[in-house]
Amino acid sequence: MLKKFDIEVDCANCAAKIENAVRGLEGVRGCTVSFMAQKMQLDAEDDRFDEILKAAVRTAKKIEPDFEIEL
């Protein structure tokens, strides 16, 4: 399943770190995080998507505590 989300991330470096960290999560097929567009695109297993999304948000907040996602 591929979904796009509006996000808040403070810098391009943090966006790149978040993208790389989320890509490494189990069940994630792909992830892009755009600082300029303030968007995140997540491609993950359909049957575990909500669980993977929560893990992605937890991971992002470890890198950027001010990270926000609009669900």
Image: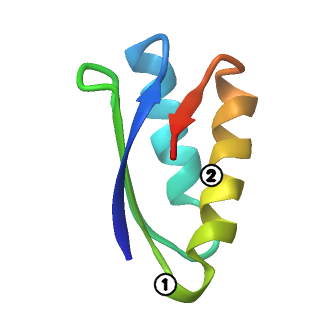
**Colour scheme:** rainbow
At a point 56% along the width and 52% down the height, the residue shown is 22
The image shows residue 38, relative to residue 24, as above or below, that is: above
Q: Which mark is residue 17?
A: none
For residue 30, side relative to residue 18 (left or right)? left
Q: Residues within 10 Å of mark 1 (few under 14, many from 20)?
A: few
Image spot of residue 64 (x, y percent): 65, 22
> Which residue lies under the disc numbered 1?
46
Q: Quadrant of residue 33?
A: top left
Pointer 1 with pointer 2, Cβ within 8 A: no
Q: Quadrant of residue 36?
A: top left
The image shows residue 3, relative to residue 66, as above or below, that is: below
Q: Secondary structure at mark 1?
A: helix
> Which residue lies under the disc numbered 2?
56
Disc 1 from disc 2: Cα separation: 15 Å
Image spot of residue 63 (x, y percent): 67, 27
Q: Residues within 10 Å of mark 2 (few under 14, many from 20)?
A: many
Q: Of the residues shown, which amino acid type is indicated by label 1?
A: Asp
The image shows residue 22, relative to residue 45, as above or below, that is: above
Disc on the earlier residue, 1 or 2? 1
At a point 58% along the width and 60% down the height, the residue shown is 24
